[in-house]
Amino acid sequence: MTNHRLRPTLLILLAAWLGIIAFATHLLISAQISRWAGHFDEDVRLIAGDLKQKLDTNEAVLAGFSVFLYAVDRSDTDSTMRYAASAASAYPHIYMIEVASKVEPSEQKEFEASLRKGWRPDFSIKDFSEITGRSFQDDHQKAATWPILFMYPSLPEAKAIYGVRLETVDYLSQTVALAHNNIRPVVSPVFKLYEGDTAYILLQEVTRPPRAGSSPLNFFGNTMIALLVIKTQALIPAQGQSADHNGIQFSAHLASAANPESLIFEQTATESGELDRLLLPNLSRRLKVDSPSQPTIIQFSRQHRWSDLLKPETLTMLALLGTAGGVLAFGLEIGIGLGIVLSMATLLLRVSTPHIAVVGRIPGSEHFRNIDRYQVETIPGVLFIRIDERLFFGNLAAVELRLTQELQKADAVTDLVLVMSAVNLMDTTAVEVFSELNADLASRQIRLHLAEVKGPVQDRLQRAALWKSLSGEVFLSANAAYEALRPPPSWFPDI
């Protein structure tokens, strides 16, 4: 009789306990979703801020170059080249700086003859269709022509552009007309470059009064158009390309009156699963990046995945809830055994997905920090990557994948520096994998360097063939590697 009375009570307690577990799981997932939303908003702010900084830089560089053209002698190409070189080297997303000069129809033959004599013997003013074979019909009568006379850098594949009339370029005809007698910069639609890739042009007319005593070679003249060619892919914010943000999908469009919804760039996210889309939130934002001449709409979305729940704090709570549920459902011994298994699985999952960061040097210091979190200095062609976990057979696949991804994203890497300040163990498999990595990089003309190697790890490496076959060097610190690998300082590039 007593057993019959206990059964309903036990069922009620079981239901209550399961309800508590379900409620705790709900609170845990809801708290994680709330954290996701906060992190997403922070990522959106960082990516949009990086893009705005580049757009503002374009405006400032064009304004400075226009003022320079107003003051420079009409034939002083050397000074113009140096000014353009300093601007382009400081801001890598500026692909090219150009100048077109206004030439009246009545002066065209004399102008061509003077430049053939004093500049390029093969110079001629030509339509864009002559070098592309792409016909373009413009019904508007032009009072003057605008041949391109200056480019930095002067790329061999772009030499055919010299002398091209801006007004005959299909995607620039309307933009040139808008820039005429306009004190503000004007932006072109996004187009495909003659050399490949996509870009857009920011241009501004520069008019100055005639001056006596200047050079007889009328190179720049008194009315010009200054142009910045901006490669669209170079505008993608660095934060958006990091592994921490590979789940964010975003796209940017020019939103000026002359270029409604002209796509600048887009980045897709890794594909999500059906259960992810069905049960987890898809966060989205739409922001306008204010810019005087390059107003931009940038759209973000992130579909969260169940794998995003596999964070240390979440896994710990799930292990505790699983243990409690196991004790209730199967008894004390089986429940505790289940808890041990879950704890071991949590530990293995943590160490099998190590934190890896691309780092750079904090200006004015010897400290290296994550490029996604700090403003840092980097060296073109040199990649510094810090590994924050011991290296063993269980996490080598993740390490190899991340190194491959970062090498693919970086441009023309010649040196890879692995900062190993947090690596306190390398097993035999790790040494073999690093030996294979060293050989693979050497075949691609990339040197592998190690920095801040701890004593026990160094002892292990010195007993292996990797130590002698290493294509690069072993540095005492990341800063020592930075100083050894950076190019000597110079004021201007070799032009």
Image: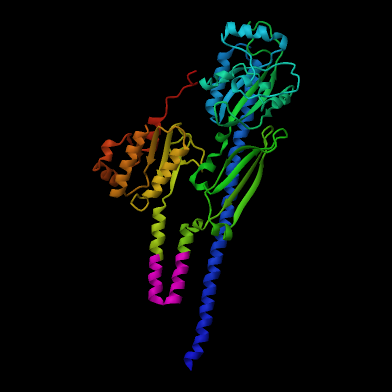
| Residue in view at x 38 percent, y 37 percent | 417
* Quarter of the view holding residue 127: top right
Q: Where is residue 231 in the image (x, y as percent from the top left)?
A: 57, 31
Magenta stretch: helix, strand or loop mostly? helix
Does the stretch in magenta take in 25? no
In the image, is 100 to the left or to the right of 274? right
Residue at point 57%, 62% (across, down): 30
Q: Is residue 476 visible in the rendered structure shown here?
A: no
Residue 125 against residue 44 in the figure, above or below:
above
Above or below, comparing residue 123 to residue 333 in the picture: above
Q: Count numbered badges in the picture.
A: 0
> Residue 136: where, in percent of width, then height?
68, 24
Residue 330's spot in the image, x, y percent?
42, 76
- The residue at 58%/53% (across/down) is 38
Q: What stretch is highlighted in magenta?
A: 318-341
Residue 446 appears in which quarter of the rendering? top left
Query: Is residue 326 found inside the magenta-colored segment of the image?
Result: yes
In the rendered view, does 355 fall on the left or right side of 53? left
